[in-house]
Amino acid sequence: MRIHMFLSLAVTLILAACGSGHEARGLKEGEKLRVMAGTPHLASLAMAIAGDAAVVEMLPGEHNNPHEFEPTIADRRRLQEAHLLLVNGLALEPWDAHKLAEAAGVTLVDCSKGMPEDRLLGEEEEEEEGYGHEHAHDHGAHNPHVWLSVEGASAQADAIAEAMAGFDAANAEGYRNRAAELKKRLAALRDEYAPKLKALKKNRFVSNHDAFPYFAREFGLQQVGVIQRNPGDNPTVEERREIEAMLRDGRAQAIFMEPGFDDSAARAIAESAGLPLATLDPFGVGKPAPDALERVLRANLDTVLKTLGD
């Protein structure tokens, strides 16, 4: 399977201390590994993998949007106590992770870097698969929301486990074993829901912003457009006309908004188009926990079934 390919790639590309200047700290004898994560989903994956062997914290506060977060002086001081800094990569983070990690003397872990190019979705691929239509704040060449699929979350779990194992050899086996158990649970979740979603007669939707193309691809859905080109920015009158045309042309059957954003535009558009409206959570904001990402994925899948089911 493709996910197994990620593990073989992880060791060579994950533990990259940030270059010129400050040397990243090592783990002292008797010291506990400290991991800082840049998003709630990475913190949650790391917590599940760490068990009691490592301390995991989140760099942004629980209510900080990762699209807008900029580390404060206090954040930088907290980071100086850590050994690893986990980032999603794929240009999700608006701050310079390399510069921040180097200044703090921590090892940077890009948790998406080992994913094969042919499994990443960019603008062209999204449009070809029906995910385009005026989407997108600009992250970079690829859509960064890989963690909202089991495939992507499992790949990132491998990356985190290998980074932690490479840094803390005494607990390496435990990290890898817990990552394997986490991936089994994620696979079981996918196997539980995939037949149910495949049986849906309706599968086309529009979302608030372009967070769900990997989720859609994995579960046989079609994201045919987005309402907000940038998270939090409601469409202009002209853009709203374009969205209404997109809903018709894309034959959308539901609109999914996200928690934490102004939903007035989505509600007005849904009412005008006569489409059901529900909420999907990209887990960009929230409290991390060892099972938090699994709970978010399950809730999203239940929402899709309830909204698009007969």
Image (cartoon, rainbow, N blue to C red):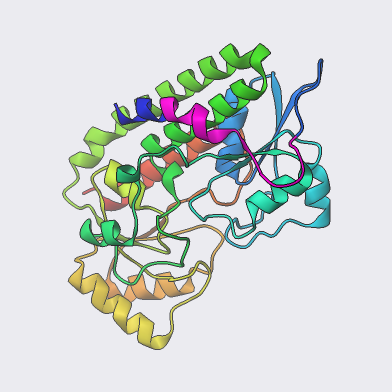
Position of residue 74 relative to residue 42, above or below, is: below
User: Is 54 on the left-hand or right-hand side of 74?
Assistant: left
Residue 61 in view in this figure: no
Task: Check the image and name the residue furthest to the bottom.
Answer: 238
User: Is residue 22 part of the magenta span, yes or no?
Assistant: yes
User: Is 129 on the left-hand or right-hand side of 239?
Assistant: left
User: Is 120 on the left-hand or right-hand side of 109?
Assistant: left
Q: Position of residue 79 (x, y in %)?
A: 77, 43
Question: Residue sitting at 48 percent across and 68 percent down?
Answer: 263
What's the magenta region? Answer: 7-24
Which residue is nearer to you in this view: 230 or 34?
34
Q: Residue 87, located in which quarter of the rendered image?
A: top right
Which residue is nearer to you in this view: 188 or 304?
188
Question: Residue sitting at 24 percent across and 78 percent down?
Answer: 245
Question: Residue sitting at 40 percent across and 87 percent down?
Answer: 237
Label total for image: 0
Which residue is nearer to you in this view: 104 or 196?
104
Question: Residue sitting at 60 percent across and 21 percent down?
Answer: 165
Which residue is nearer to you in this view: 16 or 284?
16
Q: Residue 238, located in which quarter of the rendered image?
A: bottom left
Position of residue 68 relative to residue 283, above or below, is: below
Residue 301 in view in this figure: yes
Q: Position of residue 212 (x, y in %)?
A: 38, 52
Q: Position of residue 152 (x, y in %)?
A: 41, 39
Position of residue 94 relative to residue 149, above or below, is: below
Q: Position of residue 191 (x, y in %)?
A: 29, 28
User: Is residue 288 part of the magenta span, yes or no?
Assistant: no
Q: Quadrant of the N terminus?
A: top left
Task: Check the image and name the residue furthest to the front.
Answer: 20
